[in-house]
Amino acid sequence: MKRIFIAIAALVAVVQIADAQVKSAADAKKAVESAQAATANPKKAAKPATWIKLGGAYMDAYNSPFGNGWVGATKQDLTFIMGNVKPTSTETVTLAGETFSKEVYSTMNYYFDANGALRFIEVTKPVYEDALDQALAAYEKAKEIDVAGKKSKDIDAGIKNVAAKYLDCGMTSYMLNDLADASICFEKSADASASAPVPVVDTMAIYNAGFTAWIGQDYKRSEPFFLRCIDLNYVDNGEVYAKLADVYMNLADTTAAKNVLEKGFSAYPQCNNIIIGLINYYISSGEDPNRLFELLAEAKNLDPNNASLYYVEGDIHKKLGHFDEAVASYKKASEINPEYEFGYIGLGILYYDKAVEIQDAAAKEFDDKKYEQLMTEFESTLENAIEPFEKAFNSTKDNQIKTSIAEYLKNIYFRFRDRGPEYQEAYEKYNSIMTNGL
C-alpha cells in the first residue's frame, strides 16, 4: 500500500535542479580541499566569506554525483542535456506502491514515474558521504564569525539550501524504504531551517521525521516529533493525536495513550482514527465506554447545533454495536441540518450493513421457517436504506460522494427491480451513473 505524508505534494514539489555546470567529482574535491586550506589560515579563517566558500564547495561536491538531471525532468529533456551519457542498465521497480523505471548510471540512479518524469535521484557514489553535514557546519561557522551580520543574507541562503537538500534526501530514503535514514534526514532539515539567520520552523519536516520513524516502528524516536507537532498545532485534523496515541500504546504507556486520545477528541471529535483509538482503548482496557459519550456530550454542549457531532455519535454507537442508538443519532444529525449529507449517509450505510449481516446469517440457516423470517427482515432492512441514501444523493454537491452513494443504490434497486417499473428505472439510473459517470 502506498504510504502517504501530510505534505507529500509539497515534498515532491521540491525541485532539485542541477547547476548549469555540474562539477566533476575530481574538480569538486579539489575545490573543497582548496577551501579547507583557506580555513587553516588564521587571517582567512576570521572572515565569514572563507567559511561561506567552504560551504559552497561542499554543496558543489554534494551535487556533483547527481549529474545534470533534476526532479521533474522528462526523459526527452535529459536526452538533450546529457548528450552521450547513457544508462548502463534499465529496470522496472516498485517502490512505496508505485512503479518506476530505474536508470542506472556510474554515480546515480534515476527513477522515472509512469508519466516519464524524473521523480527522484539516488546517489550511489558520493564525493563525500557527509557533504551536507560539512556544508552546514561551514555555514554555521560563518554565522558565528559574522557578528555584524554583513554576510547574513548569503549565510541564510546557504543554510536553507542545505535544509532543502536534507528534505530531498529524506524523500529519497522514504521512497527507497530506508525509513530510519529518512527520519534522520527530515530531522536534519528541520534543524537546519531553524538554525538559519532568519530561522524557520519547518513543521512539515518535523512531522515527516516523526512519521517515518513511526511507520518504521521506532516509536520512541517518533514521540518527540509528534509532541512538537501538537505544540505547533500541525496536527492534520487530529491525525497526529491518533498517531501519538499509537506510539504510546506500542510503548505500553496506556495512560498516556488515553490522555492523548481524549485531548485529541476534545479538539477534533470528527477524527475517525481518534474515535477508533478510543473505542479500542475502552474495549481492551475494560473501562466504561460511556466515557466516550461524556466527551461527546461536552463537545455538544459547546456547539449544540453542530450536526457532525451527532454523526460522530452515530458512528460510535455503530462501532459499539448499538444499532437503535446509532439510528437515532444519525437521524438527529439530519434533523439539525437537513443539508448535511453525512447524517443520511451514516443512516443508509448502517441499514445496508445490517442487511448484509442478516443475509449472511440467512445463508447459514438450515431451518426453512427461520430462513424465510431472516430474508423478510433482510429485505425490510435493505429497503430502509433507500430513503436516506436518496436524500444524501440529492443533497451532496460532491460528485465523488454521489458516485459512492450511487453504487449502494444500484445494488439495492437491483435486488428490488422486479417489484415494479419505478424500481427498474431507479436501478437503470444508478447503473448508468456507475457505468458512464455523472
Image: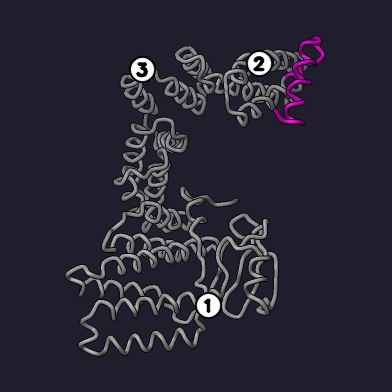
Which residue is labeled 2 in the image? Answer: 386
Q: Main secondary structure of the magenta part?
A: helix
Residue 165 in the image: x percent, y percent?
44, 66
Queried whether the magenta region covers residue 436, the answer comes back as yes
Occupied quadrant, residue 347: top right
Name the residue located 62 percent from the left edge and 22 percent from the top edge.
354
Occupied quadrant, residue 297: top left
Depth order, front residue of 243/153: 153
Q: CA distance from mark 1 to mark 2?
A: 62 Å
- 1 or 3: tag closer to the N-terminus: 1
Which residue is labeled 3 in the image? Answer: 304
Residue 215 in the image: x percent, y percent?
48, 54
- Residue furthest to the left: 148
Question: Under tag 2, what secondary structure?
Answer: helix
Question: Under tag 1, what secondary structure?
Answer: helix
Residue 155 in the image: x percent, y percent?
30, 69
Queried whether the magenta region covers residue 428, the answer comes back as yes
Residue 319 as seen in the image, left or right of residue 354: left
Name the amino acid type tagged 1: Pro
